[in-house]
Image (spheres, rainbow, N blue to C red):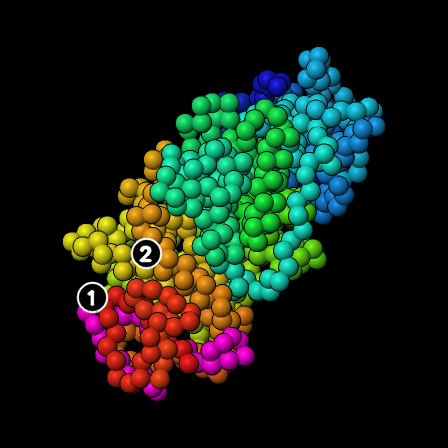
Amino acid sequence: MIIIERLFYAYLDDVNIITILLPMSYHNGESKGFSLKVGDHTEKLAISEKIRLHDRVKYICHTDKEPEIGLTYCVMDEHGGETDLQIGAIIRTPQFDEKFYYDGPMGIQYSPERTIFTLWAPTATQCQLKLANTDDAEINHYEMTRMERGIWVITVEGDLEGYHYTYLVCVNLQWREAVDPYVVAVTANGEQGVIIDLNRTPVVSKPLTGFNSPTDAIIYEAHIRDLTIHPNSGVTDKGLYLGASEKDTFTSHGQLTGLSYIKDLGVTHIELLPLHDFAGVDELGDKEDYNWGYNPIHFNAPEGSYSSNCQDPYARINELKKLIDIVHKEGLRVILDVVYNHVYIREDSSFEKIVPGYYFRHDQNGMPSNGTGVGNDIASERKMVRKFIVESVLFWKKEYGIDGFRFDLMGILDIETMNDIRKSLDLLDPSTIMIGEGWDLNTPIAIDTKASIRNQKKLPRVGQFNDFFRDTVKGNTFNLHDKGYALGNERYFEAAKKILAGSVGLKEKGLFQEPIQSVNYIESHDNHTFWDKLLLCEKEEPEDIRKKQQRLATAFVLLSQGVPFLHCGQEFLRTKKGNGNSYRSPNDINQVDWDRVYENKEHVDYIKGLIKLRKSHQAFRFHSTELINKHMSFLPVEKPVIGYTLRDVRKFGIWSEIIVLFNPLKTERHVSLPTVDWTVIADQNMVEINGIHQINEKEWSLPPLSVYVLVK
């Protein structure tokens, strides 16, 4: 890196605008004129505005000839001082985006005969490829050639498989070393890119057929390490991709664990927390450190801490592909949690090193924005950023056979990018699920362009995590003592009816346009587990009462219209010992405690029964608002009991009419049924699709803290 001593500063802020900053320590910040020089050509700049600041003077200058980005310019003042013209705010203008948008292939194109390296670095004046042969420790530097639209290219002859590579980029007279943003294989801890032959890695089985709508999904969220790290998981390769792919694993009690347990539970999709290369766990360490994975470094390379050998770039790829393939062969699908809204550390990211100032949003003062709360927001609305995100998603889809994507902090991203992803995935596999966190975060793009819940009308086939559902059922997430409907709070009565109908509104305006947009959940990796909230809210109640409340709350997820989402262990009362933000907590907090499955077997069996019930009849999972409005209505039962009916639904399953009843109170309540002769297939203790018993009278007592499903 060159150390530059600048007397003053000059920035290209628009195609013909140069901003010059003179510190007060330099001629009192005064200058009557400036000139721009490139090669032998010198041009006087016109000063259009002079602004006195606290410790400097700002000059807004115009140039008749647009400076050519990629060349080195010098700005001189009347005192004989000079400085380089740095790339300023022009990099965030529409003109820059139009001029330098490149629609061709990026990254490397490997063959045994040669490898082509392509890098987008429009503001660089020089670029080099740094290539290391690990066999003999030889390091070579190759000058890259600048092409149109800011692309730098070099072709190196010979078989480079296994070589390590990085790029050296000179911007604003400073050299920086960076890993290829498009890299697909890396060394331990992602310090260098590795040239590999993806054709030597396994081919993941084709997507499963017969999946028609997101409302047919039952999503189960899990973390690779949490899933198997428990001492009694019965898994050999604990905490690794290989461990998550092991089948027929058991606890010492003979209880199924891991993948086989998830399959037996009956869900359709496993959602895995981030698997891209992330910071927070030293891959060469003792693996005592922990992280959820929301610290992205390399978006297209798998994380190495889950691999049996993080120093073998093929191992992490092969083992992840093996896991996905086995999941598919078990009849399950994989959703990948992706984090395109930010990077771990902006200044250290390849994006910022290669094209400083482009990939991230800045506020009106030119400072990096922080809607994500981690110090940077990805500028998805810029053309080359959007291109990167879309192509990255498609890479995971094509190369790894991913069946769905969950977008972390999706409200940071823009609508056009999300719709472009949706359209691109539809060309490959329309059944691919897209869901995300549509929180309305404070990032500097227009409100009506954010991929937030507020703008769900503009995102017709993208699901949104429904925090209205979450807080209605359990109470406010950020007020642990607030009790929701499942804890008997009548204040949430009307809201509870709305969420049962998919939050689309019955004969009225709803939160969403269609039920496929509502991801219904009460807990996830974030915040306290529901069981831990109950331990605070209902600490005076006996455990059996709390268990019934958790059962009722989970039933809401599975018996509401929309897309049900379960947190791993929710069905057996998962606890994190009261920790509400366990993103880097140790194993004893985050691990899935498989002993709790054995201890809470009745609860697990009940949820398993509800899953089977939901899958058995399409009326529980209508694909459209039109069908919900046509077939669903609420019974006139006494508040806060809720009862809804699904009428004329024989063409969707074996029953022609269904009634679902919820009693969130700790006392029984009387209800009047519309007719007689009902078969109970779910009560407060069990679910049996073939029937538990008959009800032959209209007046009937509903037990405390119970869910009943009646059918004809």
Q: At numbered mark 2, what does the secondary structure look like: helix, strand or loop? A: helix
Label 1 neighbour load within 10 Å: few <14, some 14-19, many 20+? some
**Residue holding disc 1:** 666
Q: Based on the displayed image, in which of its 4 quarters is residue 637 positioned?
A: bottom left
Q: Spot the residue most to the bottom.
A: 675
Give residue 89's mark.
none
User: Which residues make up the magenta segment?
Assistant: 649-676
**Residue holding disc 2:** 602
Identify residue type, mark 1.
Answer: Lys
Q: Based on the displayed image, in which of its 4 quarters is residue 189 positioned?
A: top right
Query: In the figure, is residue 649 to the left or right of 311?
Result: left
Mark 2 or mark 1, which is nearer the start of the sequence? 2
- Viewer-nearest residue: 423 or 184: 184
Depicted 450 relative to depicted 238: above or below: below
- x then y, percent, for residue 300: 62, 38
- Viewer-nearest residue: 79 or 247: 247
Identify residue type, mark 2.
Answer: Glu
Q: Quadrant of the C terminus?
A: bottom left
